[in-house]
Image (tube, rainbow, N blue to C red):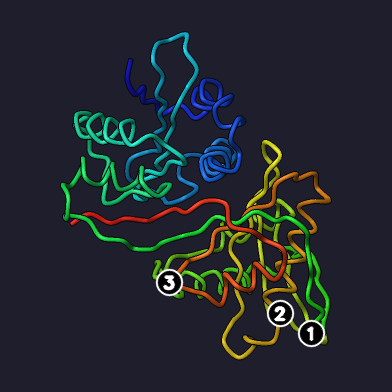
Amino acid sequence: MTWQLTGDVEEFQRVAGPYLAADPVGTTALITVSETVRRHGPYVYGAGGPPPRFGWWRENPSAPVEAAFVQTPPHAPMFGSIHPGHARSLARVLRAAGDDVPVSGVKGADGGAQAFADAWAGPGSWSVVARLRLFRLRELTPPEPPGRARQACAGDVPLVAGWMRGFAADIGGDADADQTSNAARRIDDGCLWLWEVEGRPVSMASRSPVLVGQSRVSPVYTPDGFRGRGYAGAVTAAVSRAAVADGAELVLLFADTDNPTSSALYQRLGYRAVQDHVDLAFG
């Protein structure tokens, strides 16, 4: 048997759920993205265009799932840990599908992502957009800068939406995209925290809802003028502590390996590296 594709997120969660639950660290992005689509609709990550698609690989219909992927167009397909052979097979299956879903890159664990890229675009026909390292919280060691943490509320949506555009600009994303619904969703979920100094917000951090025992911190953002004062570490510690209080056994986050400052910060807080991922672009 090979890859099975579906546009039904609930079918994906039902069939691939045991595989995801067996490795919630390696499949954290698939868990959170698929659940966000299930709860908030197919276009939560971008209006218009093709709907999301999901898939899983297993040897036969009664065998356990051994790999899975999620794609929310126009974003690239993503997967966690995957055998290079399964990644190459997925590239062939998606190309053979002959539909109008764009595949401009791939995101996944180091090794599997490159195998997919070679099969899709050919060796040397892709480039690295970002190298990411997945960290897991071990023992939290929070810093103590001036100020306090508080949970964001509905009145903070405009501020948070603007900061999310700033975060997108910092990581090379679409800085012009409207982040209002994204900010409102995270605040409604009770998953976004602000650090305040004398009543003024100076930094923010968000996390995903607890799913399969895990919660992932993202984004963390401090605007220019407030950086270098320990606020990002303090609000990251606050949102991490909130995830644990909400029942998370695993608190995770991704950091860009080209940004040693953020990686060092997370390690000072008690996060430890567990897996490397890459974001690749074709062409």
Amino acid found under the numbered disc labelled 1: Val
Residue at the spot of label 3: 175
Instruction: Report the quarter where the C terminus lies.
Output: bottom left
| Label 1 vs label 3, nearer the camera | 1
Q: Which of 221 and 132 is in front in this view?
A: 132
Q: Percent position (x, y) of residue 21?
A: 61, 31
Residue at disc 1, secondary structure: strand
Residue beneath label 1, please?
Answer: 197
* Between discs 2 and 3, the one toward the N terminus: 3
Label 3 sits on what residue type?
Answer: Ala
In contact (CB < 8 Å): disc 2 and disc 3: no
Residue marked by disc 2: 231
Residue 118, label in figure = none
Compared to 116, does 226 lie above or below? below
Residue 14 coordinates in the image, percent (x, y)? 56, 21
Q: Tell me what residue is drawn at x 58 percent, y 64 percent.
A: 219
C-alpha span from label 2 to label 3:
23 Å
Q: Nearer the viewer, mark 1 or mark 2?
A: 2
Nearest to the observer: residue 151 or residue 108: 108
Gap between marks 1 and 3 measured at Cα? 26 Å
Query: Which x, y percent locates residue 155?
Result: 72, 68
Looking at the rendered structure, the secondary structure element under dot 2 is helix
Residue at the (27%, 40%) spot, across then down: 101
Q: Which one is nearer the viewer's eye here, 65 or 246?
A: 65
Side (left or right) of 216 relative to 128: right
Q: How far apart are marks 1 and 2 (CA)?
A: 9 Å
